Image (cartoon, rainbow, N blue to C red):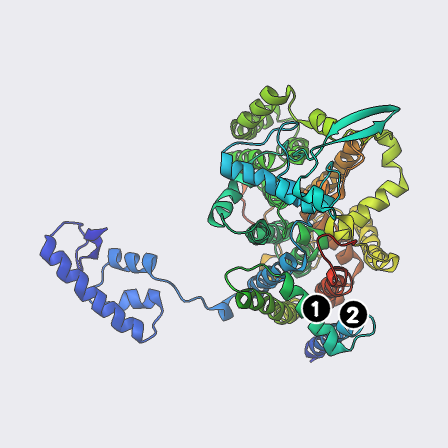
Amino acid sequence: MPIVAWCLAALAFLVLLGVGSVTIYPGGGATREASIRRIWDVQSERLPPLGSTDLTRFLFGASVAVFVVGSLAVLWLALTLEDDPARRDGPDGRGAATGGRSEPA
Amino acid sequence: MARRLVPGRRDGAFPGRLAQRQGFVAHEGARHALLRRGLPMAELANRMPGKSAPVASWVNRLAIRRVDVRAWSGVRRLILALSILYLAKQVIFVFAFPAFTGHDEVAHYSYLRTVATEGRVPVLLEDRLPPELYKYCKFTLGWICFQNTQQYLDNPPYQWPYSYRGQNVVYQEGYQYAANHPPLYYMLMAPVYWLSDGASPETQIYLLRLAVIPFGLVTVLLAFLMARVLFPGDAFLAVTVPAFVAFQTQISYEAAMVNNDIVAIALYSWILYLLVRGLRDRFPGRICVLIGFVLGLALLAKGTSLTAAPIIGGTVILGVGWRSWRTWLKRGVQIVVPAAILVSPWYAFLYRTYGNLSGLPQVQEIQWWDNPSASFFGLLFDRGFALERFRETWGYFGWKKIFFDDAMYWAIGIPLLIALGGLVQYLVVANPIKPLNDNDDRVERPKPWQYGAIWVLLGTSVVAYLAVVQFGVDFSLTQARYYFPVVNAAALLLMLGLRTLLPKRLHRIGQGAVVGALVVLTVVILSQYVLPYYAGWEIGGGV
């Protein structure tokens, strides 16, 4: 199925993007792991003490995870969504004259 | 309510306290037994022994229904997923930027503190920014900044001698320069301030940033609803318009900072949605009253919402027909009255306090160093001015300290120029007069009201840009964010242009490509610009 191929390609692209972004992170030739750790540490230090540090790390980390999964989900749904023929004829704009309903076919 | 708990009674007669209690207990037991079997609530209500219509209604009202997302339509699932993705992205934005680095966050936080602790609106040329926030002086206007000097951190300067135009003058420093903004946002945020009272200002900033995310989400949902009202069955616009708004970089930034902008953006988006509905339904009275109500709220959120007023007037006349002057006068009254009732106390306050209806002369007095010299048409045709607004629209994060490379601006600008070209083609080719064939594309062959709505959205965008130009005549600090409230109009127009250029068979791929590109843009901006910029950042650092 072409759509599946497109989704797989999109997934691969996102993974490559994530890895690539971190790899070329302008941290002065740092390795990928060091770059990830650096981003994490910098953010963790800056997070406010909303009760406990663990809570804020969880909030930030969970958001990153949801962002990755959510991006793929939205991408999948966007690639598979088709026009709705039942709704293509909206109201005709004559307002009260038609009660705001669709014009007759 | 108690009478409805009694089984088998449809006449509403009250049979006595004991019978009522027995009936209630019996029903509660049966309800829990059915719940354990995992039946849907509607079915559960129908299967209850001795059921009656009032009981079923009561159960249906009070029970928490199980939401079956799998039964939803594709577009509803997409919007749900986009909303969750948006919320996650916004939380990342909230924490990616250090406290007080957003647009005028020091001034807006100080305004909120005045509202929350003193129960009043601050006054220009009287109120000052709090001394404990002097360490963030480089994120303010008009507060001479020695952020690395302990002497001034301990005792912030509130006046300073300058040599200006050949004269030695002592100028006042550290004024509250955002006090001309209306109070709605600060009133809405006051409970968050009270709940976090006792926490550090930095912690409060993060909590207040989280609190404005819903306004960003509302803006995204209104973009979707507007696209759906305008072209009900079209998938491309239903996907790409809200996605564009959700991932637009600076709108995302606005919805993750302490600032009244995103509230004004959400309310302006609501007005645009209502205008499109009004065009479709010929502005019935209830929509007009609602438009007036929302316009009043928008004016209480930010003064720039005033650009909506001529747009509303023109659209109503377009919708009901300019010859029907009695009708549009009546509609005008229905809009103006609720708006005027809402905003009149604020404008009365402005007039009584400053002797004008904007407070801008007082802002000019505070920003004495800002001396713009360009004329309206000089700015309108100034290429540098337009380019600067484009850069502000997509980049310039962190108090205009994080810049993109030119390549990045081109990567954003070229697709937008292509989409703009597609929009021009659409406006020229789309023919709302010719009768429809069954196979015609309903977007490319709009009905007259749809075509009119496109022009209204275009006019809205133009008026918003011209307002920014006009503001630049008096203030060289004019900024692109003053036209951000029309983001939903711009998103729909650009995506409509892109759709026009894509063959029908490529629409689904185009939808995915737009969403993918926007996700990529967000990842690149955060990983290549924002996070690296703040990697070695300290409040008193040089960056």
**Mark 2 or mark 1: which comes first in sequence?**
2
Instruction: Give the left or right position of residue B397, taking residue A96 as reference.
Output: right
| Badge 1 amino acid | Ile
Counting the numbered discs, the total is 2
User: Residue at position x 30%, y 68% from top?
Assistant: B44
Instruction: Give the left or right position of residue B43, taking residue B399 as reference.
Output: left
**As displayed, is residue B158 above or below residue B539?**
above
Chain identifier of the residue bearing label 2 in the image: A
Q: Residue B280, located in which quarter of the rendered image?
A: top right
Residue picked out by circle 2: A25
Pick whichever, A96 or B93, lies toward us: B93
Say whether marks 2 and 1 touch (CB < 8 Å): yes
**As displayed, is residue A27 above or below residue B165?**
below
Q: Tell me the crowding category of disc 1: few under 14, some 14 to 19, or many 20 or more residues within 10 angstroms, Cα based.
A: some
Name the quarter where the C terminus of chain B is drawn.
Answer: bottom right
Residue B486, visible in the rendered structure? no
Helix or strand or loop: what does disc 2 sit on? Answer: loop
Q: Residue B127, located in which quarter of the rendered image?
A: top right
Residue picked out by circle 1: A39
User: Residue at position x 71%, y 79% from top?
Assistant: A5
| Badge 2 amino acid | Tyr
Chain identifier of the residue bearing label 1 in the image: A
Residue B72, horizontal then vertical, whole percent = 51, 66
User: Residue at position x 49%, y 50% from top?
Assistant: B196
Q: Residue B263, located in which quarter of the rendered image?
A: top right
